[in-house]
Image (cartoon, coloured by chain):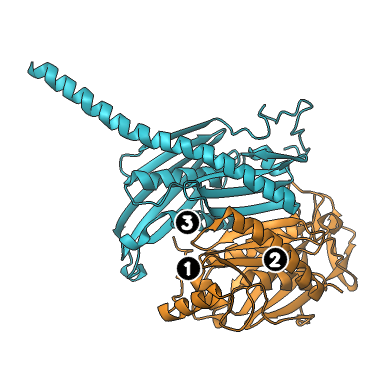
Chain colours: A orange, B cyan
Amino acid sequence: MRWMAREPVISRIKKKRILQLISQGKRADGRGLLDYREITVEKGVIRTAEGSAMVCLGQTEVVVGIKVGLNTPYPDTPNEGILTVNAELVPLASPTFEPGPPDERAIELARVVDRGIRSSRAIPLDRLCIVPGKRVYIVFVDIYILNHDGNLVDASALAALAALSNTKIFGYQIDEEGRVLLDKSIWRPMELQNWPVAVSVANIGGELVVDPCLDEELAMEAKLTITVDKDGRVCAMQKSGPGSFSAEQVVEAIDIARDKAAELRSMVMG
Amino acid sequence: MSHEKPKLIGDDGRRVDGRGPADLRPIHIEVDVLANADGSAYVEQGGTKVLAAVYGPKEIHPRHLGLPNRAVLRCRYHMAPFSVEVRKSPAPSRREIELSKVIREALEPALFLEYYPRTAIDVFIEVLQADGGTRCASITAASLALADAGIPMRDLVAACAAGKVEGVLVLDLCDLEDKYGEADVPLAMMPGLGRITLLQMDGLLTPEELKECIKLAMDGCRKIYSMQKEALRERFLRIRREVEAAEAAEGGAGG
């Protein structure tokens, strides 16, 4: 199974310390269990992209670039534009990232971010149709991890949202032969209909912890990523990691995610 | 191909296949169905047909992939090209790679991997016919195949989805309901231990609806769990019947 990633290891003494601190309601970097690391969001960092944003979540750094092109629509959605999300775990971001086709971690990351955007209908895909059944806009969301210090999903989902909110849609012209061509002299902003935000809650030694850093991810049982839309509805969820949750923990995590998502959303809106 | 959304909940409250909201589809489970595998199981859930096989614990190749403190669990979820309406390329898709990962992580909490350092346990899942709920049927089958292979487990893992279709919260979605419904929440758990080992969600639900779906899916898992145990028991009763039949034949011949 070539797509399997080789897990990094954590020393036993470090893991023990993390568990010990969390059982006392503390964390190695001084945060409370439900605190995010410092977050910065910068939009418009890449001039050559139609939309872009960089998000730093503590030491985790992610750039998302949006490119918009033309394509033929999928046969089952002839009146809708196309959304494609891809994630690259570039080798410069971590000693565990290797060059080559995306492994299961990259695919899972891209698909969880994709589900949040798609299920919440954040992008008005019906407004990205040019000639029904023939020509539509295709929106490429490319997630680029620059430094890996855990919780890539939350950082990537936030960066993707920030980048989409700052995306230009170029105009088009139809020539005499009926071909559709992009006209880069005119553009309109992509108007988002929804603002999905992902919040990951880790189960570390039986305690629920928000925004796990890399060491905490290596010490955790499992995490649950819950993506919440602007109206407080859940639009995507993914349990990830080798362990498990109790039903009570899942219910608690959903409530935590709803509160935290509102906090994060205010950092990218407006 | 029609893109019209069919009516999914009838005026009498019945679903497209005649079920009530909290009904499972008919389920058929068989354990030990493949001669070569160390363990195997076959699950039919409505129109979904899944075969799972386990090989291992076995020597891991290449050797450097082995871990000094535990076995490596590997899992491949794969759909046969003929399992869907439009032929699926046999090459693993991004969806299949993601599902292989989440299925592995759904099974892992049930296993004592630390008992088998430097080995591999391979789980191969083939979806032969897809009609919604394939990842859940795969987990139900794979956990039985692991048990059939004699690998020590904390509990069986049972899986079932719940979701929302035309405003109604329903259990065990079929393909049509998954495609045209509002939300899908696949869930796997170890019912004996009350631990949730897989939880995904796709669609839009209020937190209250989501919590209700989780409850519904857990009830479904518990029902499937008792069918799993019954199927496992049947696998051993079958051996006993075979032995008894052989003894009877021998006794008959000798006397």
User: Which residue matches tag 1?
Assistant: A5
Secondary structure at numbered mark 3: helix
Location of the N terminus of chain B by quadrant is: top right
User: Residue B95 or B56: which is nearer the viewer?
Assistant: B56
User: Which residue matches tag 2?
Assistant: A198
**Gap between marks 1 and 3 measured at Cα:** 13 Å
* Observer able to see residue B208: yes
Check chain identity for marks 2 and 3: say if they share one: no
Where does residue A39 sit, x and y in percent of width and height? 71, 80
User: Which residue matches tag 3?
Assistant: B104
* Residue type for callout 1: Ala
Check chain identity for marks 1 and 2: say if they share one: yes
- Chain letter for mark 1, please: A
Location of the C terminus of chain B by quadrant is: top left
* Residue type for callout 2: Ala
Q: Residue at x 52, y 58 (%)?
A: A244
Where does residue B9 sit, x and y in percent of width and height? 75, 32
**Gap between marks 1 and 2 measured at Cα:** 23 Å
- When asked about the image quadrant of residue B12, the answer is top right
Where is B1 relative to B195, above or below? above
- When asked about the image quadrant of residue A198, the answer is bottom right
Q: Residues within 10 Å of mark 1 (few under 14, many from 20)?
A: some
Q: Is residue B118 left or right of residue B199?
A: left
- Chain letter for mark 3, please: B
Q: Residue at x 59, y 73 (%)?
A: A212
User: Residue B19 or A84: which is nearer the viewer?
Assistant: B19
